[in-house]
Image: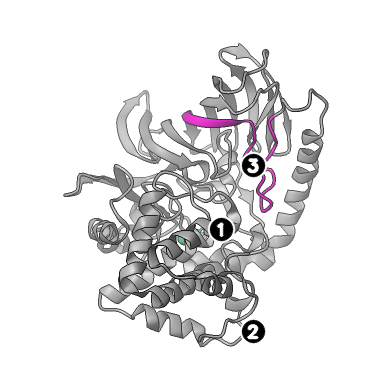
Amino acid sequence: MTPPHRQAPGRRTAVLRREAVLATVPFAVAALLAAAGPAAAGTIGASGAGDPYFPFSGNGGYHVKHYDLTLRYDTTGRHLDGKAVLTARATQKLTRFDLDLNGLKVTRVTVDGTTAGFRRSGQELVVTPRHALREDREFHVTVSYSGTPKPVSDPDGSADGWIPTDDGAFVAGEPQGAMTWFPANNHPQDKSSYDFTITVPKGRTAVANGVLRGVRTVNGHTTFRWHQAEPMAAYLATATVGKFKTEQYTTGDGIQVFNAVDSREARAAAPVLKKLPSVLKWESRLFGPYPFRAAGSIVDHAPDVGYALETQSRPLYDSAPDVSTLVHESAHQWFGDSVSLTAWKDIWLNEGFATYAEWLYSEQHGGDSAQKSFDALYARPAANELWAFPPGDPGSGKNIFDTPVYARGAMTLHELRKAVGDHDFFRILRAWATEHRGGHGTTAQFVKLSERISGEDLSGLFHTWLYAQGKPSTA
Ligand code: ARG
Ligand code: ZN
């Protein structure tokens, strides 16, 4: 079930929606104009990845292989200085291409070391290299920028991106916020490796994804270097800054754990974080080997945020999590992080799976059975928000973190489990994580895999639970 802290954004929706709409419209108009600009047809990278829920997220014409981000954050003045070096490959001839960047001031852009033209248009940073880039060509883009980063207001009314806190910043990017702190190809279709070099005032810690490569203090500032080797979607990147107590160890399976905890949350977090190795081990038995070399948690004290995020290899919590939330964000490391979405419409592949992991954990650790969790939800009347829309078709970006995605998404998996039996069901989960490891998966592929492994026609089941309007009747 969805713990309250992940529902909080939904509950705030009514209050914030007006503001969100106002913030979105000018961007949309600006980006449409950008897309319609003059220049030779067929050599301009598209201003979006083609996702109708977030039309200007991501860009066409290239893939980013690697981001090298050098950041300096002044926690008092809330000023960010950034330099991003992107290693990319053109997927078509490019006379012009876009990056996503929202706010901040860009001072210089180079392509392969040569100054490039650029302009801002909504969330698009439109780059015109001095020379056209050939298809397949690898190139480097450097963007120098600075300013006071501000979170974006999502269609569901929650804030994401660089969210200032009283001692630093809570940095979470789902679904759009990566572009508030670095120029990105901001859609999960594009996955890349990352290096982070983050300088903060001495006494603060900057925590990003992956393994810690070095820490150095010079002249009252400390620089943290992080390396995320396995491909990561931009929304899963973090560079959270705060006054943290830190802890590092290696698990019996060789996973390098780094925990950072705000001291105000330390007492409540300690017994939960202690379970991380056993939770990862339990999930590895169910879903296959843990997909990353690094793990850990960031437990911030960010009372206004209202949600946690499965930032890759190191989930980010706005307060001390309970065990169920730890299990949920850990399960996302397989479902959502290692196996990524190609479209936000498929969000149940992330949230339904992570929620079902909570049910399974409870079932296997002396709590309610998954059947009991299912029954409690199924008892809700037809008018309940749970049945407001089918999880396979949330309809718009406004709904992607609503109850049907989490709860009815998990119920879909439970129905699948009952239809194919435990043996095949757990083979399906493991095969999904294994066959799409480090890549992408779609709902259609999941249906196909389930049918292949079970040998059954499951189209009716998936239609009923993922796509049919209203409360399904159980057979
Ligand atoms: N994926 C997060 C979770 O584990 C939820 C993120 C919500 N983000 C938002 N902008 N509303 O459930
Ligand atoms: Zn989740």
From what the image shows, is residue 165 above or below residue 418? Answer: above
Disc 1 target residue: 346
Q: Which residue is drawn at 76% across and 39% down?
A: 31
Which residues, given as a range, are shown in magenta? 45-69
Reading the chain from its start, which is encountered first: label 1 or label 2? 1
> How busy is the neighbourhood of tag 1: few (under 14 within 10 Å), some, or many (20 plus)?
many
**Considering the numbered disc 1 on the image, is that residue within a helix, a strand or a loop?**
helix
Disc 3 target residue: 49
Residue 181 lies, in percent from the top left, at 56, 37
Report the quarter where the N terminus lies: bottom left
Q: Which of 349 and 99 is in front in this view?
A: 349
Q: Nearer the viewer, residue 103 or 222?
A: 103
**Distance Cα–Cα, label 2 vs label 3:** 35 Å
**Distance Cα–Cα, label 3 vs label 1:** 15 Å
Residue 352 colored in magenta in the image: no
Q: Nearer the viewer, mark 2 or mark 3?
A: 3
**Considering the numbered disc 3 on the image, is that residue within a helix, a strand or a loop?**
loop
Is residue 307 visible from the viewing direction of this image?
no
Q: Which residue is drawn at 69% across and 51% down?
A: 52
